[in-house]
Image: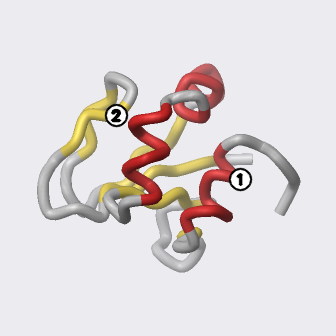
Amino acid sequence: MAKWIKNIDTVDHTWNGQFISAGEYFEIQQIQEVSFANNIPFRDDITAGLAIIAKDDSGSNDITDSGEAITYLCNLFVY
């Protein structure tokens, strides 16, 4: 299941070593999933409203609730 990050901040960010421009989506590669899920500063930025997790890059499958986004990122249950 694909997981995407969207930088919803007004400035560019580098999370987990990955540069993501403001307003852009980035697809998390399977090999990166655990490191993003365990990256506490990144998860804090989701909670702070700087990034969201999405199921694709269409804009219609963004997970805007930070708790649900972190749950989806960490594979705590299947959507």
Q: What colour-coding does the image apply?
A: secondary structure
Q: Are there few (<14), some (14-19), or many (20+) residues within 10 Å of tag 2?
A: some
On the image, the x and y values in percent for residue 37 come to: 60, 34
User: What residue do we see at 61% from left, 59% from top?
Assistant: 69
Q: Nearer the viewer, residue 55 or 72?
A: 72
N-term mark: 1 or 2: 2
User: What residue do we see at 12% from left, 54% from top?
Assistant: 11
What residue is disc 1 on? 71
Q: Nearer the viewer, residue 68 or 25?
A: 68
Residue furthest toward the left?
A: 11
Image side of residue 23 versus residue 3, left or right: left
User: What residue do we see at 78% from left, 43% from top?
Assistant: 75
User: What residue do we see at 53% from left, 37% from top?
Assistant: 28
Q: Are there few (<14), some (14-19), or many (20+) residues within 10 Å of tag 1?
A: some
What residue is disc 2 on? 15
Kind of element beneath mark 1: helix
Q: Amino acid at mark 2?
A: Trp
Q: Quadrant of residue 32?
A: top right
